[in-house]
Image: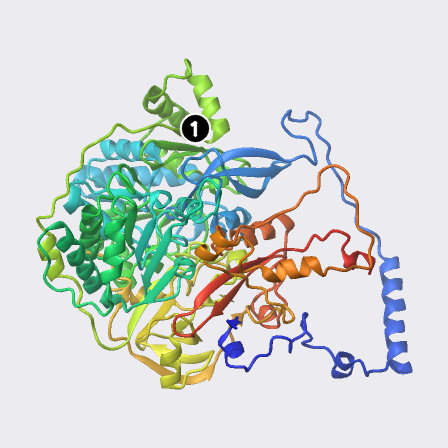
Amino acid sequence: MKKYWRSLNELQGDLKVDSDPEFSITGINEDEVKGTGKTNRRDFLKMLGFGVGYATLAASCETPVHKAIPFLIKPDEITPGIANHYASTFFDGNDYCSVVVKTREGRPIKLEGNKLSGLTQGGTTARVQASVLNLYDSARYENPTKRATDIKWEDADKEIIAELQSIAEKGEKIVIFSSTVISPSTKKLFADFIEKYPSAQVVYYDAVSASAILDANQKSFGKRILADYRFDKAELIVSFNADFLGNWISPIEFTKQYSSKRKLEKTNPGMSKHVQFESTMTLTGSNADYRIPVKPSDEGALLIELYNKLAAKSGKTILSGGNAIVNVDSLADELWAKKGKSLVVCGTNDVNNQYIVNAINQLLDNYGKTIDVNSPLLLKQGNDEEVKAIVGEMNAGKVSAIFFYNVNPAYDYPEMDEFVTGLNKVGLSVSFASAKDETSKLTKYSLPDNNYLESWNDAEPKAGLYSLGQPTIQELFNTRQVQDSFLKFIGAETSYYTYLQKFWETEIYTKQSGLIDFTSFWNNSLHNGVFETANEAATFEFNSDGLADAAKNVISAGSGIELQIYENIGIGNGTYANNPWLQELPDPVSKVCWDNYLAVSYNYAKEKGLELGDLVSVNGKFELPVLIQPGQADETVAIAMGYGRTNAGLAGDNVGQNAFALINNSGNNKGYFISDVKIEKVAGNQKLALTQEYHTMQGRNIVRETSLDEYVKNPSSGNEAHLHAEEHSTTLYAKPEFKGHHWGMAIDLNACTGCSACVIACQAENNVPVIGKEEVINRRIMHWMRIDRYYSDMAGNPEVFNMPVMCQHCDNAPCENV
């Protein structure tokens, strides 16, 4: 019989499924646990004395008076106790989502996905759901400052404008150092700023870069674009280190597409097939039909080998190299049989690998079918080479002014010491960070931006798809939207709201003909949150001239231990490190929270004598506890980025270690894996908040599975236990009668990826408290619902199953009688 297990302890028999109580007994007297304790007279009198004393004390205190101030003139749209909903846009420089904001009495309290969006289709992520908490973050800046001292807005504007004019007159460089900007009106404003100050330059910086994909598309098609991948049109998906269900590029969009091809319906009796090559177990890999663990340096040879097999079938010239460790003959045959209905993606930030992937998709005739280059995604625009050049110019004293918008390079730039040294040589430095971060601590001025829920904005996440953001609450602090700051700097006597409306009237309104006046168009777009148009078809020809050189320059398979740096589902790139909801969210795969760790393979741990929590030194830079991760490729280790913040706030400071310091920045693109890593065991063991063993199903076989072929033959396949339970069900209760509708909820486990967005959504909706790492270790985690993760088969490369466990709103629930 197939065995399902939650942890290596359970697999090896060190943890019995039924041995642990359902609730924590930490701190309870042993006699009480065994039920043999007796309360003596002295203990009774102690308790009685405390109870009477406390009651007397409470009775003698005057109950505080809370005064309610009524609406003298109540706003028409607000009715106390009834929620209002507003369409808006979430974009933090990394993740995009069209959202609907739920407010009560003018306070945003919950986010939902906007179902009118053709891109995100009503979906969200854990980070999107948790972002509402950032609005109320105590680490937010409350006033503009100069050298950490409060300053009035008008004084800051006057001083900065004077410095900008002086710098511009001398022809010295001014830099806007920004994350990817998808707001078309903000890009227009940046252009206006450059027109005012001609020596200015905008540099886009992505902490999690896709620069290599953009560069490869420049070589392939002559345009530096990011194609839109259509997982909903692919019958065979092959992914190389691309966590497209978790973090890669547009995970909400890709998850919706992917799930639509995994649902079994009468109109769609088939399912897409998914093959994943990766180094560390990701959310995407855990959902794959076939998962092959490989070292990061093996990827290039695998891609060349796969290309050559397909090139031989199409009569094209093969490439040199390709000594792959995995036989890809059958995979090439399957891909060839699915020409135009397949999709090959790669998440590695290496231009040579990405160029070969483009060539593979070209051979498979996927462009225009499962890959859309006509309406590219605009979510990643960073240029690693330009950023590296700017940091060099800063150190050479060639940059006189720099503005940081939505970035934190003092924390996440790979060579952060070099960056900080260069920043100290810049005369005028301004940060627009809305909350504490490492970069704003170093700048001359801090002009805090509004939270996105306090702001007007627009977005174009994909060419032709627009969305609007609107404020759902007045500014909580003395902050100002960054666009209003730039309008001040160029001397414009207008607000960004007016600027935004004028931009939409001249640039967006003209793209439609359904509404005859702009006011109606604006109100309709604001109400819906989105406005979508179709792009005119364009012709893209694939250029293979540099393909042979790309094959020669791929990274060769190396020896020694290789380190993969990846993005965590909750914390991501570290922007939300001070969000306690995300800190306490168990990782969907490892089920660890409140820490990052060094993930090692089962065989490596066995060889080196490592156990869970053992401390190791990584390249002599820092120490981390070990997590033995089933599915981790042999001779590889992995660390999540986003931790190790030093100026984030109470929840985020000094949690884990900063993996950005290990990123390879020697080439034109940042490398998120490094070779020949030195791992040394040091003294000590650190407890990890590992939640998967905390709950028990009391021996019930909770995981049910079957194959597609068996399901087609018998829809009850894999769920025979349910049929048996229904046939033998007995109860002491009378069968309840339901008059009218009887509501229920079912989860399609083929569509559920285990992303944990629902866990944070439940926490936001029900105000579920955060308890901190120590109490999580004490088995007291408070989430009302959770996603249990189960493994099966061998520890080296197990199958993975996600099982949502809801708050059991039972019919005629037994607990109601207690």
Front-lying residue, 13 or 376: 13
Residue 746 showing in the rendered view: yes
Q: Quadrant of the C terminus?
A: bottom right
Q: Quadrant of residue 306?
A: bottom left
- As helix, strand or loop, the secondary structure at mark 1 comes to helix
The one of 375 and 501 positioned closer to us in this rendering: 375
Figure coloring: rainbow
Q: Is residue 405 above or below residue 608?
A: above
Q: Residue 231, percent across and down? A: 35, 46
Identity, as a three-letter code, of the amino acid under mark 1: Tyr
Residue denoted by label 1: 497
In the image, farthest residue toward the top:
516
Of 226 and 433, nearer the camera is 226
In percent of width and height, residue 93 lies at 37, 46
- Where does residue 72 sit, x and y in percent of width and height? 71, 26
Left or right of 807 on screen, residue 484:
left
